[in-house]
Amino acid sequence: MLGALAPVELTPEARRLNRIDPKALPSALAAPGGGLFTAYEEGERTTYLDDIRNAVGKVGTAVGSTLAGITGGGGGGGDGKENSKNKGTPAFSWGKKKRTHSSSAGDMDFKTTEFKNYNINLHAVENDEDLFGSGSENTGGRSGFPGQVMLGTAASAISSSCDSPAKRKRLLIVLAAAAIVTGIAVGAGNREVLANSIPSLTSSHYNQDLERLQNNPRFESIRSRILKSGVTEEEDLLPVYPPSAQFQAVEWLTDGDERQLRVDDEYLLQRYALATFWISTYGKVIEQSEQHRGDGDADGAMWTKRENWMSRRGICSWEGVECHHRPGGHYSETHYDEDNYVTIIDLADNAIKGTLPQELFAALEDIKMIGLSSNELSGSLPDAVGKAEKLMNLDLNSNSIEGTLPTSIGNLRALKKLELGDNAITGQIPRELGELTELEEFALYQNNFVSTIPVNLAKLTQLRSLYLDGNALTGSIPPSLGEISSLLDLRLRDNELTSTIPPGLSNLENLEVLYLDTNLLTGSIPFQLSKLHKLEELHVQRNELDGTLSPSLFTLDSLVQFYADHNFIGGTLPQEMSGLKSIQQIYLFENALSGELPSTVGELSGLERFRVDSNMLTGAIPYEMGNCLRLRHLSLEKNNFHGTGLPESFDKLINLEKFYFHSNNIRGEVSEDICKLLTEDLGSLSELTADCDGGEEAKMQCLCCTECH
């Protein structure tokens, strides 16, 4: 006997339709060592792949006679129908309403046999309707397989040929499976009929007691209250398989939640919303013992922070949840063992998978913060996000959220922080975001937005940071962004922005960070940016900028980083470089700079990285550069520097780690004092390159260079 076989894995389309995918069944049956059904008989798991194949061979004629009923043939069956009228002949049907049905037929006692994810009833045939269904149409409704096909002839043949009741019962189960598989295989061309005929699958975990649940007044009352509140769509509370998270949450509130709040309890919808969120992202209702063990679900997925979730404890004690302060308590007492209106959900970096249900926004009417960054959330942001009108902080950074950004997000007028970076959101940046006038932090970085930058973002007069980098934004930078005087950090890098840098950005007098790099910007760097005396980082590299560097730009005394490499900037470096009092990094490589390197560069006492390689600079390397004692990386290669040897002052650069000056016209030799910088006790130098290739004919003689050119 083969080992236990897994049930059919439903395709996403099949799950959406709550149907079996007809294409999946035949291949599952034929797979070696695999199959469709796992049967349970008197508590023992047994599998019948061999028996299925044998049964198909033995009763092929009988199966064939029933295919018309499976694939669209009305009452179906021919002789099978006539022969199976005998009372007591075992039969097969789907979805009988009675949970357990047993009857005796001769020496055979048939009881409901449950297949994993399927409920299959074997019972004694009472009349023709048990065999073929009550209608002439073979859609059969949700209560029966197409035409409720019964393999009467085959059943009779097996009953007379098998020598033991157990074997007969087993082969009847097998034969039922064979009929399903064969019929669907033959009827694959009539998929529409099949899709309408195959019933919704029922789950033994959630829906085995569906009739009991639906007749439970508490269930219906909770369901009615939820629908009346408008927080959930009616289709999400329908009894289908797989059951929705909303349906499971109502079931849990009905008889799984030990807290058993009254149906009219003020906080019932709060508890419902959190249960829906849990099931949407965890996938199941865990047992209380499982909470203490810390077990995950069958796929190994689990929340790492989940204490008290789905327990009898008040929702204000569930980990990561805070509520209005305890009545009569201190205002800071927001985490306690009671139910109240939820104000904060903070579960960042918590291994949360799945989708965000709309109830999280529609039902939690007082929610102020949702912090779910650095998880594995997928799907789209629900349109109901706009219902959380008191929301002040929405942080969903670093997930896998996709789809477009709903325009309803413009209703969140209290929002101060909107963090949706590092996801897979597409489409346009909604103009409605310009209505969030209280917004202070706005991040859409590393997504797939393809629109232009909305001009009306200028209305966000409280904004301190705007991160739109790492998208595919097009068009020009709106000059109106210069009207957001509160802005401290503006990042538009790594897009497809064109045109010039707006001089109006100079009005951002509080700006500290400006990233415009990796775009298609043209023109020169506006001299007006010299007004930004609080600017610490200016990144305009990897564009198509040209023109020259205005001397006024070198008066930015707060500037720490200046990156303008990989452009077409020409002209000379001005003596005013000394005005960069705070500068640590200057990257001007891969441009068209010419002239001499000004001696005032030696006054940049905080300079750590200086790259001007791949330009057309001339003259000697300034002696004064040896005063840049914090220098760690110096790239002067691929220019036209000339002279004899290196300045003697360079032997003081004990922090220098990398020094490249090859591909120039410098001749002579590298002094022994500079070579000593390569020793651990005297310096930090690890890479030194020069034009020392060619032996005695080389431009430079260097006994310590790590690489010769």
Image: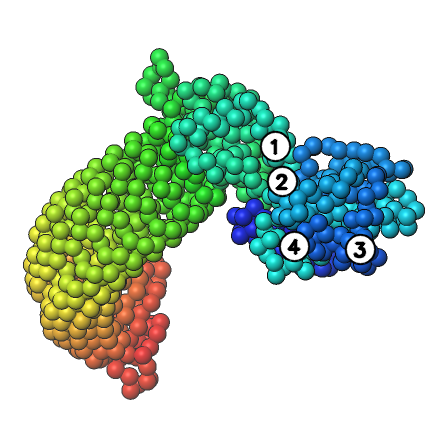
Q: Amino acid at mark 3?
A: Ala
Marks 1 and 4, the one that precedes in the sequence = 4
Q: Which residue is mark 1?
A: 210
Choose between 262 and 128: the one closer to the eye. Answer: 128
Q: Amino acid at mark 4?
A: Gly
Marks 4 and 2, the one that precedes in the sequence = 4
Nearest to viewer (mark 1 / mark 4): 4
Disc on res. 62: 3
Task: Measuring from the top left, give residue 591's x and y in whole percent.
Answer: 19, 71
Mark 3, other Cα within 10 Å: few <14 / some 14–19 / many ≥20 = many
Task: Measuring from the top left, give residue 355's x and y in whole percent.
Answer: 45, 43
Q: Are marks 1 and 4 in contact (CB under 8 Å)?
A: no
Task: Measuring from the top left, give residue 566's x and y in whole percent.
Answer: 23, 68
Tell me: 161 left or right of 614: right
Nearest to viewer (mark 1 / mark 3): 3
Mark 1, other Cα within 10 Å: few <14 / some 14–19 / many ≥20 = some
Q: Give the Cα distance between marks 4 and 2.
A: 24 Å
